[in-house]
Amino acid sequence: MKVKNETAKRAVITEVDCSRDLEQAKVFFTTVDPEEREAVKKALSSVAGVLRSLLGKQMKLRQVPALEFLVDTSEEYGRVMDRLLDSIKIEGNGEELPKGEEI
């Protein structure tokens, strides 16, 4: 049994966070094209049962977690923070802080 949904195959899994009892698993993903994320999230949710079944067979777990798919926005957040940090000026003389240099 394999996933045949082409849209779901566009997901790039970035992190999985499982509960201690393995009842729940938050699966964080991103896509190459940010505009595809909602469509990919819907596709992943529609094949969650198949993925859960594959997980159970591959990992031979007694408890196979329910999968919840979440868009990972950490890369965009990091870019915003980089831009903010790059825009900070050294107080007093108005010079920009050279990249990689500490205050």
Image (cartoon, helix red, strand yellow):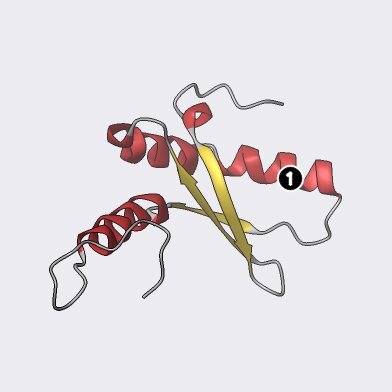
Q: Which residue is mark 1?
A: 55
Q: Is residue 60 above or below residue 37?
A: below
Q: Quadrant of residue 100?
A: bottom left
* Number of numbered tags placed on the structure image: 1
Disc 1: CA contacts within 10 A as few (<14), some (14-19) or many (>=20): some
**Element carrying mark 1:** helix
Location of the N terminus by quadrant is top right
Residue 15 image offset from top left, x and y in percent: 58, 54
On the image, the x and y values in percent for residue 61 come to 83, 56
How far across and how far down the image is residue 63, in percent?
Answer: 77, 62
Q: Nearer the viewer, residue 99 or 14?
A: 99
Q: Residue furthest front?
A: 93
- Quarter of the image that includes the C terminus: bottom left
Question: Could you tell whether 35 is left or right of 66 in the image?
Answer: left
Residue 48 falls left or right of residue 73: right
Residue that sits furthest to the right in the current view: 60
> What residue is at 82 percent from the left and 41 percent from the top?
58
Q: Nearer the viewer, residue 20 or 52?
A: 20
Image-quadrant location for residue 74: bottom left
Three-letter amino acid code at the position of disc 1: Leu
x then y, percent, for residue 94 = 13, 68
The vertical placement of 49 against 82, above or below, is above
Look at the picture and state if 38 lies above or below 5: below
81 sits left or right of 10 in the view:
left
Q: Residue at x 51, y 24 (%)?
A: 5
